[in-house]
Image (spheres, grey):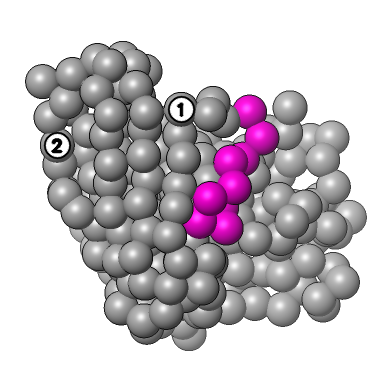
Amino acid sequence: EVHLVESGGDLVQPGGSLRLSCAAPGFTLSDRHLDWVRQAPGKGLEWVGRSRNRANGYTTEYAVSVKGRFTISRDESKNSLYLQMNSLTTEDTAVYYCASLGSSGYSYAYWGQGTRVTVSS
Amino acid sequence: DIQMTQSPSSLSASVGDRVTITCRASQGISSSLAWFQQKPGKAPKSLIYGASTLQSGVPSKFSGSGSGTDFTLTISSLQPEDFATYYCQQYKSYPLTFGGGTKVEIQ
């Protein structure tokens, strides 16, 4: 059973920064495309961005709403995925999930439990 | 961006009912569509990808169909554990986009 574990969620003031992490003990993340997906309170799912796998150079894609403010990166030595969030606004308040695509590369096979980010003064 | 429209936004059904949820894409996405189930306070669960391929471990009461712009998710015989919110997602092109969700409630 694969377990993705997010961490780093917190209460932060508008304009602040936060870094989220996603780890997967016993599961090699470098072979998989990984996404961040968020869900604002009482709302639906919103795709945030993608880090492609090592074979694709860990290249990234972002939603328009976060482009230029959020950065997705990896640390292969720590088998971890990160989401650096800058210039946060109240609109970024959400539960953030990391999700791993399956071996087919088409859709998510595994999800984390989520980490909560609250942007408020 | 490709817009995904789900209908209905909510429905009430009874145990044993056959339930169908529709997802429409604003432009053709071939079969690049996935379905997810989410229960309150929990992470989403992947059900279907490629419009009709069940994820490993997903029971066969779930089925998906469609191609191009129109897709359906069908639950053949609704059980208590199936009451949840269902989302579609297109992965044909960036940005990936989700439908607004369909909440399936107990009648």
Q: Callout 2, which amino acid?
A: Leu
Q: Foreground residue, A43 or B20?
A: B20
Q: Is residue A94 above or below residue B4?
A: above
- Magenta region includes residue B53: yes
Distance in Å between CA atoms under marks 2 and 1: 18 Å
Image side of residue B43 versus residue A80, left or right: left
The chain identifier of the residue carrying mark 2 reads: B
Upstream in sequence: badge 2 or badge 1: 2
Residue tagged 1: B61
Image side of residue A72 versus residue A118, left or right: right
Location of the C terminus of chain B (image quadrant): top left
Q: Is residue B47 above or below residue A83?
A: above
Location of the N terminus of chain B (image quadrant): bottom left
Residue B25: horizontal and vertical position, in percent? 34, 71
Image side of residue A1 versus residue A76, left or right: left
Dot 2 falls on a residue whose secondary structure is strand
Dot 1 falls on a residue whose secondary structure is loop
Q: Foreground residue, B93 or B28?
A: B28
The chain identifier of the residue carrying mark 1 reads: B
Asked if badge 2 and badge 1 are on a common chain, one would say: yes
Q: Quadrant of residue B2?
A: bottom left
Image side of residue B32 versus residue B23, left or right: right
Residue tagged 2: B11
Q: Is residue B102 above or below residue B100?
A: above
Query: Which residues, given as a range, are shown in magenta?
Result: B49-57
Residue B71: horizontal and vertical position, in percent? 37, 59
Instruction: Identify which residue is drawn at 19% across, 54% down.
Output: B7
